[in-house]
Image: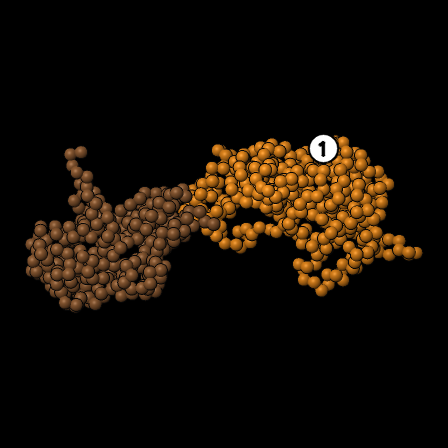
Amino acid sequence: MSESAPLAITYREACKQALRQALVEDSRVFLMGEDIGRYGGCYAVTKGLLEEFGDERIRDAPLSESAFVGAGIGAAMTGMRPIIEIMTVNFSLLALDQIVNSAVTIPYMSGGQFAVPLVIRMATGGGRRVAAQHSHSLEGWYAHIPGLRVLTPATIDDARYMLLAALVEPNPTLIFEHVMLYNMEGVLTPGVTSVDIDHAAIRRPGRDVSLITYGGGLFKTLDAAETLAKEGIEAEVLDLRTLRPLDSDAILASVSKTRRCVIIDEAWRSGSISAEIGMRIVEGAFFELDAPLRRVCGREVPMPYAAHLEDACLPQRDAIVAAARDLVRPT
Amino acid sequence: MSDFKMPALGADMEAGTLVEWHVKQGDRVKSGDVIAVVETQKGAIEVEVFVEGVVSNILVPVGARVPVGTVLARIDGAAGETAQPAAAAARSTTPQVVAAPIPVARPTIATGARLKITPVARRRAAALNIDVTTLRGTGAEGAIRLADVEAAARALPASAPSIRRGVDLSEMRKAIAAAMSRSKREIPHYYLSETVDLHAALTWLENFNRDREPLARILPAVLFLKAAALALRAQPKLNGFYESGAFVPMSEIHIGWAVALRGGGLVAPAIRDTDKKSLADLMSSMRDLVERARRGGLRASELTSPTMTVTSVGDRGAETVTGIIYPPQVAIVGFGRIVTRPFVVEEGIAPRPLVTVSLAADHRVTDGHLGGLYLAEVARLLQEPEKL
């Protein structure tokens, strides 16, 4: 072998490499957020960047989401490429007015005279025993808003390269990093230097049932697909990757092939992105369906702190397996 | 392990076409379950299994035409290995056949049940020109799925007419011709008849029906049926089969009830344990049988188990009917139209409702003397309708 074998890196490291590349390649890029500098970010994604790039470009912000997101919007409008980190999606609600009423609407209300090329990263999802104010999955809410692009990288490659694609995007872009993925190890696909943020990806092809998911749901779902394969059920796993705009074509193509679909979404079931996906399937592929649609979603409660309760509230492999099996081989 | 075989659903049947499997390999079955449908000259017949166990092997695919006795499936099971499949039941010399449940009409589209079918299955069925109401769903809540349609499509023999449940009257005519020719050729019939005064029976029946809803009312034919069955207890030599040169008496009395089909044709499915059923039960059994006979939903056990046949022509028939024995049975009893005629009552003459009861019986088994005793018993029973 002329080249050394690729090294396994963590999802966290992939995110950091992406940030570093952005900072190196484009002097307009700067990072801003709570504790991202000296502390290194609450999930340690930005650890070491302050020493490397200095406090002009790695800026600790006060506990004021509305203020620093608003500052980021202004910077983006005036030619910078800010990357804002919000600790968790729960806290992003404090900046909701800035995101929805300013970032999204300014390009429209200015008749296209202003673009807001703002990137906001935030952690999402449950499983880390940090209870109800740090564990929810609200990315589906943002997927409701036209003018936003909502990315949910689940793989090492996506974590590494989606940020670069987001920085090219002229509209405000939100990147949701699932908290349970940061420690996941994987190998960057050799030769890949960019990813596209327009298309969903089939992570495992199959013919019997489509398992549609994104972000933190992907690996549980792949796990479930493994189990199903042992029973002779070949599940296709579709990773949405981008929740807005949704890749309807990929969803409809997969469901039209397998004719059955389970949507796996850690968010609360009612009014969730899974509801939107299900509706699109019914609108676009009703006549292809050979079974009712199913969803495996988070329990509709504030996330409990206790480990066993938190686990019970999140979609787990067995529930995914059971739902898929039921569609393929009803009892 | 036991074999589930293509049943003989009539004296003349040599082969049948398997048109539906209601089970698949690995399914658990219990006695009395309808597990297949066989297309015969008498229409599509539901075939029950009379063992308990697991279907281990399905040997004949849907659409195949196979001779009577061909093993259709193998059933592994602990219980009931010695019990016999439906086909053997009536032909068997063992009278103790497992009793079939009282047949209940299966809900169909026509009765208003909503058909559950997935969108893709409906579309595919339309493309293949398959009647979805003939399919059995394997999906959630019994929904018909794509796989069910595809299976039905595979089952359609190439370029053969599509399988249709119901009765092909020209085929049925052939079946009747074969059975009756054989009967007239092989069975030395003797014929007797008796005129029975129905004054007591009809008076009692009028009282019985007076305060009842139309559906709960009983027809005179039910009295005939019950009387014909009870009289067999006194003359068991008329109840059974003539096979391989000998008479095999049957201890149970399952009267075959001749049902005329619209447009012609005739079937005589069994009403099991006719002698033990109440008049009300017999009425509902008759209604159910007639309905299913005309729709083509009879069961194999009903066609193979009659031990004697009754034909009643009703109020639009002839005054007298003399039947032809349906082999291998040994007797058939006919009830003509009820007519009012002058009749000698005690010392005078009075108008009375009368019915001519006839008996055609197999001379190889019985003689006219015994036949006469049987008819006298029928007449006697009809004088005490409250005891029927």
Q: Residue at left 25%, top 50%?
A: A184
The location of residue A117, given as percent across then percent down, is 14, 57
- Asked if residue A279 shows in the view, the reply is no
Q: Which of A51 and A70 is in front in this view?
A: A51
Quadrant in the picture for residue B247:
top right
Q: Residue at left 75%, top 50%?
A: B275
Residue indicated by mark 1: B182
The location of residue B149, given as percent across then percent down, is 46, 43
Q: Vertical placement of B207 versus A207: above or below?
A: below
Display colour for chain A: brown
Question: In which quadrant is the N terminus of chain B drawn?
Answer: top right
The location of residue B257, given as percent across then percent down, is 70, 46
Does residue B47 appear left or right of residue B192 in this picture? left
Does residue B143 appear left or right of residue A8 in this picture? right
Q: Residue at left 29%, top 47%?
A: A250
Question: In which quadrant is the C terminus of chain B drawn?
Answer: bottom right
What kind of element bears circle 1? helix
Question: What colour-coding does the image apply?
Answer: by chain
Q: Residue at left 51%, top 42%?
A: B26
Q: Which amino acid does label 1 sit on?
A: Arg
Does residue B81 appear left or right of residue A147 in this picture? right
Q: How many labels does the image show?
A: 1
Dot 1 crowding, Cα within 10 Å, few <14, some 14–19, many 20+: some
Q: Mark 1 belongs to which subunit?
A: B
Q: The orange chain is which one?
A: B
